[in-house]
Image (cartoon, grey):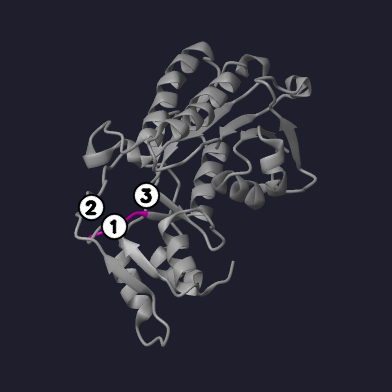
């Protein structure tokens, strides 16, 4: 069974990936905040956790011959204040960079990181939507050094737009609509033409697994839904013939859709669509 060194295993993408593939790989998960993340740890015979404390790794990690390293570690926020800037740099740049600098102690075949399409606002090659997007590009830049340092390791970066699942409790648009619906509160749409490109977490996890299992040229790749979904239309379709409806208010601001085509990930195919999943998500209970 292949051995995977993984960061961000208590976050949304990392936790779902562990759940989906815990019977297929041996996972060695590095986490930082013991008190905060303890409740989010998945207990399974194929998952072991190691605390990263005071910028130091558990020495036992250096005795393991890992096959892959996957970096899901991230701090996401739309805010651009100083407090969040510190957390963004710590989680999205400093922590993975310290680990990447130690890769020569392992026998890795592939390194997989996750970027964001919010690096490409207004469909530019690089126009960061916020500090979070800037930090993702900063890590990409650092990777260029590590690619030269570790010539025997293949590096991959995966980019996509929005993620969702049935059990998502993040401060994202779909969970917010669901929460407000069950609390009989109004949903405020910041833009009158809000269209987003959604991918189910299972499709994202499958993309990561394709990079692990398939012979693919090292590169930065994109996975993308066939549809940019109009949030207003999703709500209108949901409200049809229902006694209880989603209350909605739209602002007049215009939303600039990021719709840039990058290199597509080979072998990957979308299986889930928000248009089919939306009603089941909203009706579900957390």
Question: In the rendered view, would you say 154 is above or below 27?
Answer: above
Dot 1 corresponds to which residue?
190
Which stretch appears magenta? 193-197
Q: Quadrant of residue 137?
A: top left
Tell me, yes or no, whether the highlighted magenta stretch contains residue 223: no
**Residue identified by numbered label 3:** 224
- Give the overall secondary structure of the magenta segment: loop
**CB of mark 3 within 8 Å of CB of mark 1?**
no
Q: Residue furthest top?
A: 149
Element at badge 1? loop
Residue 61 horizontal side relative to residue 247, left or right: right
Q: Is residue 43 above or below residue 59?
A: below
State the residue position of label 2.
Answer: 255
Q: Earlier in the sequence, mark 3 or mark 2?
A: 3
Q: Residues within 10 Å of mark 2 (few under 14, many from 20)?
A: few
User: Residues under labels 3 and 2: Cα distance?
Assistant: 19 Å
In which quadrant of the rendered view does residue 173 lie? bottom left
Mark 2 touching mark 1, by CB under 8 A? yes
The N terminus lies in which quarter of the figure? top right
Eyeballing the image, is 202 above or below 139? below
């Amino acid at each position: 069974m292949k051995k995977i060194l993984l960061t961000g295993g208590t976050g949304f993408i990392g936790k779902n990936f562990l759940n989906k593939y815990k019977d297929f790989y041996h996972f060695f998960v590095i986490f930082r905040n013991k008190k905060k993340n303890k409740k989010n740890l998945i207990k399974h015979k194929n998952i072991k956790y190691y605390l990263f404390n005071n910028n130091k790794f558990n020495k036992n990690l250096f005795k393991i011959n890992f096959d892959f390293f996957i970096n899901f570690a991230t701090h996401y926020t739309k805010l651009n204040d100083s407090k969040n800037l510190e957390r963004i740099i710590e989680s999205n740049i400093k922590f993975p960079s310290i680990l990447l600098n130690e890769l020569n102690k392992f026998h890795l075949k592939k390194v997989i990181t996750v970027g964001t399409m919010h690096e490409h606002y207004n469909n530019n090659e690089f126009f960061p939507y916020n500090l979070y997007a800037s930090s993702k590009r900063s890590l990409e830049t650092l990777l260029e050094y590590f690619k030269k340092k570790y010539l025997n390791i293949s590096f991959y970066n995966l980019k996509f737009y929005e993620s969702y699942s049935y059990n998502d409790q993040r401060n994202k648009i779909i969970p917010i609509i669901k929460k407000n619906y069950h609390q009989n509160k109004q949903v405020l749409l910041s833009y009158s033409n809000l269209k987003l490109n959604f991918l189910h977490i299972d499709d994202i996890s499958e993309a990561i697994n394709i990079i692990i299992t398939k012979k693919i040229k090292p590169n930065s790749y994109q996975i993308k839904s066939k549809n940019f979904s109009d949030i207003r239309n999703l709500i209108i379709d949901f409200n049809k013939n229902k006694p209880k409806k989603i209350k909605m208010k739209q602002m007049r601001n215009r939303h600039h859709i990021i719709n840039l085509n990058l290199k597509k990930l080979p072998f990957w195919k979308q299986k889930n669509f928000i248009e089919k999943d939306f009603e089941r998500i909203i009706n579900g209970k957390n």
